[in-house]
Each structure stands twice: as structure tokens, then as C-alpha cells.
Amino acid sequence: MNSSATHNSHQEFILLGFPGFHDSRRLLFIPFFAIYLLILVTNGLIIRTVLAERPLHSPMYVLIALLSVVNICSATTIVPKMLLGFLLHHNHISLVGCLMQMFFIYFMVIQDCNLLLLMALDRYIAVCKPLRYSTMMVRNSFVLLTIAALVRGLCTVSPVVYFASRVDFCRSNTIHHFACEHMALLHLACGKTAINKLVGLSLRVFSIICDMAVLSTSYGCILRAAFSISGAPRHKSLHTCGTHIMVILIVYFFRLSSSIVYRVSREVSQDTHNLLTAIYMLTPALVNPLIYGLRTKEIRIRILKAFVRITVAG
């Protein structure tokens, strides 16, 4: 980090979005607005269904609804600012605003992963310790686990944002990106950023390793327990766990792909780099509700019933 006075550090930045499409950036508004609208509608439908249907007020479905809340918040952290830049050229952002956006981008990523961990715990207890499920997954335990997830997110993301706030950004005030990602902002630093990169990489690696260990152990035990039973209970357990595993693979694949994006950033254009970043940021929020809506029978049936009621009433 730079130890010099901070009066030369830029306090306002310009988010270029997709530099190669500067003259036709209004055309980019259409696909990204459509994606954002689809994210809001599909995730909102999951949330509405879980809230409106009392039989879905169990921990598993509440966690699915919370995942949809995180999906909406994650997309809202990025897309509205991007759309304003495309349509109204409103692409200026203060240093404080940039750091806040960075915080919420990574905080939502961590919360996404935390909810997947809680789902794994919920399914582990339901399949491996079914007689204790009603006593272990009570409201107080659920609230404590949610608080723990929030604290974990704060502890993981706050150091990254804190060290970024200590850097002087005097090389340029133009961010060749549509969002204040950590590395995109550090590219503008005029001092040493080794500590920032080390902290960011260490926290990411530690977080992913811990998550993979917990998820692998939980679903390993679940699958072993599921294969020890037969008939409908086995099918239901495998189907439910299969849905969760699909979402896990999607979330962590795109989370890991962010590292690959920066490895190949020197070999591809800035627009291609930004497009890959947009894909790994938005795809989980777009795909998760579709998976749960199609593969979770209880949610799918109630969504279809709601559409039938609306059609009949209309």
C-alpha cells in the first residue's frame, strides 16, 4: 500500500462498462434489462410462493426463498448502475460508493455460499437424523445460523474492502469495467497492492476450501444414508439432494471462473473480459430459481396452481 499523503488520490471514478461499445452502449441496455427483469420475476415468484403457502414454511423452503432474496440483491448491486450508464451516461461513482458496491458484491457472493451450506446442514439432519430434525431445526436455531452466516460474510469481506480503502488511486479515475470489482479498482492504484492481493486471495481460497469440505462431507453422508433406504423415501432424498447439488455446482463453478477470467484477461479484449465477468456474476441468480421452480415438486405445483387461479379469475 502507498504510505504517501492521500490528497492526490481520486475520489470519483468513471465506470466505462464495455469500452468497445461506447457509441452503441444504448443497445446493451436491452439484453441486460431483460436479464435483470427475468431475475426479479423468477426469484420474486419463488419468494412469493414460499411466503404465501403455509405448507412451505419449513426450513428447506425458507432457505430457498432466502437464496432468491440474495439473488435479487446480488443483481441489484450491479445491474441498475450499469443500466443507468448505458441509457443516461450516468457512469460516475464516488470512492465511497465504489467501496460500498465492492462490499455488497462480495458480501452477496458469500451469503449465496452460506445459504448453500445451511441447505446442506438442513438436508443432512433431515436424511441422517430424521428423528431429531424437529428439535434441531427450530426457529431459534435457524435464527442463530442466519446470524452466523451474516457474521461470516462481514468477517470475510470487510478486510478486503478495508485494505482497498487504504490505497491511493492516482494512476487514473477510469475503471474499464461496469462494476467496482476488487482487481478492477486495484489496477488504478499508484502504490503497492501486494497486501491487498494476498488478503483477497487468501480469504477466497480459505473460504472455498472450507465450503467444499463441509459440502462434500454433508452430501457424502446424505447419499450414503439415502442408499441405505429403499422406495419413495430414497427417491425423494436423492431428487432433493440432486437439485441442491446442481445449484452448488453452478454457484461454485462461476465463483471459481472469476479467477480464470483474470488469468486470461491479458489474452482477450476488455469487452470480452467484462462479458465473462457479467456471466459469472448474473448466471447463478438467473438459473437458481429456474432449477428450484422446475425440480422442486412442492414449489412447482403451487406456482402452477397460482397461475391456474389467475387464469380462471381473469
Image: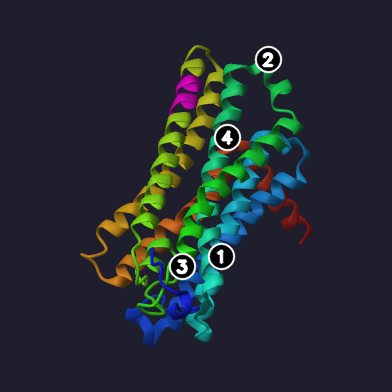
The residue wearing badge 3 is: 180
> Would you place residue 134 above or below residue 293 in this image?
above
Q: Earlier in the sequence, mark 2 or mark 3?
A: 2
- Residue 237: x percent and y percent? 55, 25
Residue drawn at point x = 30 percent, y = 68 percent: 272
Q: Residues within 10 Å of mark 2 (few under 14, many from 20)?
A: few
Amino acid type, callout 4: Met
Q: Which of disc 1 and disc 3 is earlier in sequence?
A: 1
Element under disc 3 = loop
The answer to whether marks 2 and 1 mark residues whose Cβ atoms lie closer than 8 Å is no
Give the class, few, some or many, for how many residues have Cα within 10 Å of label 1's Cα (few <14, many ≥20). Answer: some
Q: Which mark is residue 119?
A: 4
Residue shown at 61% from the left, 60% from the top: 41
Asked if residue 128 is among those painted magenta in the image, a careful observer would answer no
Badge 2 marks a residue whose secondary structure is: helix
Q: Secondary structure at mark 4?
A: helix
What's drawn in magenta, residue-wise?
Answer: 216-223
Look at discs 4 and 3 and give the one toward the viewer.
3
Furthest-left residue in view? 267
**Front of the two marks 2 and 3:** 3
**Residue kind at label 2, given as amino acid type:** Leu
Decide: few, some or many residues near mark 3? Use Cα within 10 Å; few <14, some 14-19, many ≥20: many
C-alpha separation, residue under disc 2 versus residue under disc 4 = 18 Å
Instruction: Find residue 131 and name its label.
Output: 2
